[in-house]
Amino acid sequence: MLKKMLATAAIAGVLMTPALAQEKFNFALNWFPVGDHAAYWVALEKGYFAERGLDVTLENSKGSGDSIAKVDTGAADAGLADAAVIIASRTRGTTVKVVGMVFDKTPLNVFSRSESPITSPQEMEGKTIGAPPGDSQRQMWPAFAKAVGVDEGKVTWVNIEPAAKIAALAEKRVDAVADYTTGLPLYEKPMGEGSVVMMPWANHGFDMYSMSIMASEKTMTERPEVLKKFLEAAYMGWRDVMADPDEAVAIFKKRVPEIDEALIAANMKLGLDLMKTDRYRDNGIGWIEEKKMCDSVELVNTYMGLSSAVECKDTFTTDFLTKIEMPAE
């Protein structure tokens, strides 16, 4: 009888014990939800964040400059941004560092209309290019222009909101827009298949680290284990996206009902093409190679006209990465 009473008391104690509070973690996306973000919705849906005690919120931003500001000021704990913009921000006193990569190959690119295509950097002279002020490619433009021999003064940038890029190009308000190669399906839907021309910067010798996950010094020093858990869950999400893209799109649609599934699927595939590399196969998804990162820092130092040079060691760390293997093909 006594044993039964003790057992009953023990069960009651367990039932009365409140669930452990989850750590709130705000993650700043670099834009509105697109295929580039699929992994984070998958990780939410499959409970990868929750299993690690994290209550994750995904927040839209208006380009890398915006997401960096959120992370640096503490409005977000970590976020997505272009590596070049993160590097350059260090000269303005930010404490953000790259803590993991997303795309191992660069998606930097310019879109134009097929009726007046821009297929080489020199053809951009005399043209107007649309992008938000905080857009990663707009901020990286000086480096690209100098590297390929384009006169910056002959190119006019036009301020547009991220969501207005497609309309601005389609309605001929600008000659071109700066946007990742992964965005091609989003442009072709309203403009027609084959009506949009890409000019990937990598095709002109400008391959550097781009889309990455960043965190502030505050997050890294005060919440190191939380950051490590977040990255582990996020890259598990990317692993699952690679393994089953159809499932990922279905989850994305469930979580963000307004998306166009066909567009997101094509958009996401272009992103996965930038991630299926030997570097990720050997070191895990999101790995940062020191040489490529330092080469990227050197490009920023050389071409972006910074007030002072940035040290490579100040721009990234691999301390918070857990090796997440790519799925078998």
Image (cartoon, helix red, strand yellow):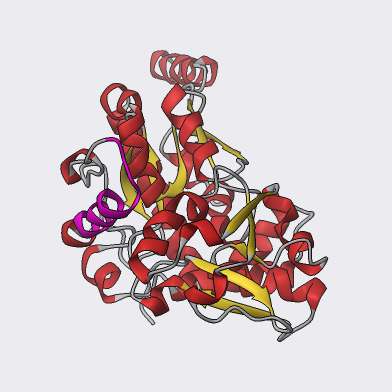
- Residue at image coords 35%, 49%: 304
Whether 171 is drawn above or below 216: the answer is below
Q: Is residue 234 visible?
A: yes
- Residue at image coords 44%, 67%: 150
Please give the range of residues in magenta: 293-307
Residue 208 colored in magenta in the image:
no
- Residue at image coords 49%, 75%: 122
Q: Is residue 318 left or right of residue 227?
A: left
Place of residue 72 in the rendered image (x, y in percent of width and height, measured from the top left): 42, 28
- Residue at image coords 54%, 49%: 135
Whether 163 is drawn above or below 195: the answer is above
Residue 291 versus residue 27: which sits nearer the camera? 291
Q: Is residue 39 visible?
A: no
Q: Is residue 30 left or right of residue 90?
A: right
Q: Quadrant of the N terminus?
A: top left
Residue 299 colored in magenta in the image:
yes
Residue 193 versus residue 302: which sits nearer the camera? 302
Of helix, strand and loop, which mostly describes the magenta segment?
helix
Residue 252 versus residue 109: which sits nearer the camera? 109
Place of residue 58 in the rendered image (x, y in percent of width and height, measured from the top left): 58, 40
Place of residue 224 in the rendered image (x, y in percent of width and height, measured from the top left): 28, 30
